[in-house]
Image (cartoon, rainbow, N blue to C red):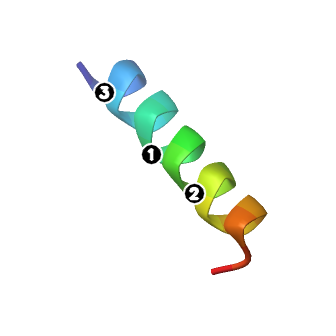
């Protein structure tokens, strides 16, 4: 459950960074 959550958070952060937030 930790690895999945970490991957989800990493993807979210990358998506936000791409948007320029």
Q: Is residue 12 above or below residue 21?
A: above
Marking on residue 9: 1
Q: Position of residue 6 (x, y in %)?
A: 44, 36
Q: Is residue 15 above or below residue 17?
A: above
Q: CA distance from mark 3 to mark 2?
A: 16 Å
* Residue at 30% from the left image edge and 27% from the top image edge: 2
Which image quadrant: the C terminus?
Answer: bottom right
Marking on residue 2: 3
Q: Position of residue 17 (x, y in %)?
A: 71, 66
In this rendered view, identify the residue nearer to me: 18 or 8: 18
Q: Secondary structure at mark 1?
A: helix
Marking on residue 18: none
* Mark 2, residue position: 13
Contact, mark 3 vs mark 2 (Cβ under 8 Å): no
In this rendered view, identify the residue nearer to me: 18 or 11: 18
In this rendered view, identify the residue nearer to me: 9 or 16: 16
Mark found first going from the N terminus, 3 or 2: 3
């Amino acid at each position: 459950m930790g690895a999945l959550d970490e991957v989800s958070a990493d993807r979210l952060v990358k998506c936000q960074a791409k948007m320029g937030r």
